[in-house]
């Protein structure tokens, strides 16, 4: 399994080759503010190992979803959006709206979300 990919934007953010506003870092995940926020709180959470998309997860890498979720829940508490609630989003491929092919969870909060999503 490749760890980080040279031409991947989020891998470059993980390596700090590209600047981002980091809000949380541990040995498994990095979380940073989305450059184009869609809510008062909009954080991107990534595993520190490159996987293109959620449909590529295997028994070996499925734990990344758990790692990202635990980080998201921690950040939600820190940003005090845990009581009112928040949304976690994973976009997959073209129809799912994925634009960056390094698996990530969006943490969105600080306003009431609508349903169904666009
Ligand atoms: P996707 O559409 O793949 O689910 O989400 C990619 C997200 O990454 C988008 O919300 C977009 O605003 C964000 N993004 C794209 N480029 C950058 C960047 O260079 N820095 C940061 N912090 N976020 C980015
Ligand atoms: Zn990557």
Image (cartoon, rainbow, N blue to C red):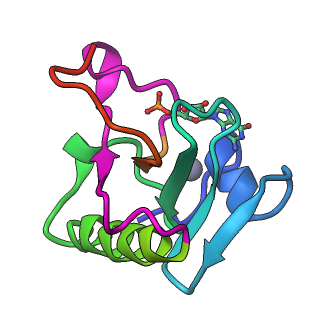
Tell me if residue 115 is in the magenta stretch.
no
36 sits left or right of 84 in the view: right
Q: Quadrant of the C terminus?
A: top left
Q: Position of residue 101 (x, y in %)?
A: 48, 36
Q: Is residue 107 visible?
A: yes
Asked if residue 102 is positioned above or below residue 71 in the image, the reply reads above
Q: Position of residue 80 (x, y in %)?
A: 48, 69
Q: Quadrant of residue 15?
A: bottom right
Q: Position of residue 76 (x, y in %)?
A: 43, 67
* Of 17 and 71, the residue lying toward us: 71
* Of 38 and 100, the residue lying toward us: 38
- Please give the count of numbered marks on the rendered protein: 0
**Residue numbers of the magenta segment:** 79-101
Q: Which residue shows up at 23% across the image and 55% down it? A: 57
68 sits left or right of 20 in the view: left
Q: Is residue 104 visible?
A: no
Asked if residue 47 is positioned above or below residue 63 in the image, the reply reads above
36 sits left or right of 52 in the view: right
Q: Quadrant of the N terminus?
A: bottom left
Q: Which residue shows up at 31% across the image and 24% down it? A: 93
Q: Quadrant of residue 27?
A: bottom right
* Of 17 and 68, the residue lying toward us: 68
Q: Which residue shows up at 58% across the image and 68% down it? A: 30
């Amino acid at each position: 399994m490749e760890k980080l990919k040279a031409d991947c934007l989020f891998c470059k953010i993980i390596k700090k080759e590209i600047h981002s506003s980091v809000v949380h870092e541990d040995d498994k995940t990095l979380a940073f503010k989305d450059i184009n926020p869609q809510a008062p709180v909009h954080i991107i959470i990534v595993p520190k190992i490159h996987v293109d998309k959620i449909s590529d997860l295997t028994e070996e890498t499925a734990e990344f979803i758990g790692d990202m979720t635990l980080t998201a829940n921690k950040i939600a508490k820190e940003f005090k959006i845990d009581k009112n609630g928040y949304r976690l989003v994973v976009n997959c491929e073209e129809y799912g709206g994925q634009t960056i092919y390094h698996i990530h969870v969006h943490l969105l909060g600080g306003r009431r979300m609508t349903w169904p999503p666009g």
